[in-house]
Amino acid sequence: MTPRCSSRRWRVLGVAIGILAFGGPGAPGAGGEFKLAPPIKAPGLDGKIVEVKYADARVTLVNFWATWCLPCREEMPAINRIFQKYQGRGFKAIGLALQSGEPAEVKDFLVARKLGLTYPILMSSDDLAASFGDIEIVPTTYLIGPKGEVLRSFFGIASDFEKSLGGEVEKILGQPPSPEGPAKKG
């Protein structure tokens, strides 16, 4: 799907500035407020459709970002460090590129910036963003449990994002898994 015109981009940017100035990450009213995450089926950078299964992890990070978003560029390496630290403990991360052009353009962007991301990047559509409560700002990050329950939301970026996110992931993973949690792969 082709991204909407730049007027939406400016609206998103304006809302992001407002949230950062007045609310910061997790501010009520930012992005969608919902308790159950919708299913994700989206194309990867290779064009193949990927289905994200929340039940395969104790916690899944879903990060909406855009190539034109400067705070997103700062946040992605932090997400990657947390992913590398916790992936062996039932944590997975998914990046959803929103309004960022075609898959080849996103791939070129990631290579040119030498971000070295080790978690999957998928292509988001406006419809997918709307299913998450209509993403109003980027970056928007959700921590989602194995039953699809939204455990924590981050809107915009803060100077302590990595510490806050890492603390939340550590807290969630430190709890015993629920009986219906992710199946062990054997």
Image (spheres, rainbow, N blue to C red):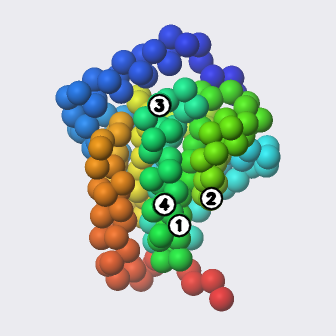
Q: Which residue is mark 1?
A: 84
Mark pair 1, 4: CA separation: 5 Å
Location of the C terminus (image quadrant): bottom right
Q: CA distance from mark 4 to mark 2?
A: 9 Å
* Residue position for label 3: 70
- Identify the mark at residue 81; answer none if there is no mark: 4
Q: Residues within 10 Å of mark 2 (few under 14, many from 20)?
A: some
Q: Quadrant of residue 27 in the image? A: top left
Location of residue 84 with respect to 136 vertically, above or below:
below
The reply to whether discs 2 and 1 touch (Cβ–Cβ < 8 Å) is yes
Image marks 3 and 1: residues in contact by CB distance under 8 Å: no
Residue under the image location 59 percent in, 18 percent down? 4
Q: Secondary structure at mark 1?
A: helix
What's the residue type where badge 2 is placed? Thr
Quadrant in the picture for the N terminus: top right
Three-letter amino acid code at the position of disc 3: Leu
Q: Amino acid at mark 4?
A: Arg
Q: Quadrant of residue 105?
A: top right
CA gap, disc 3 and disc 1? 22 Å
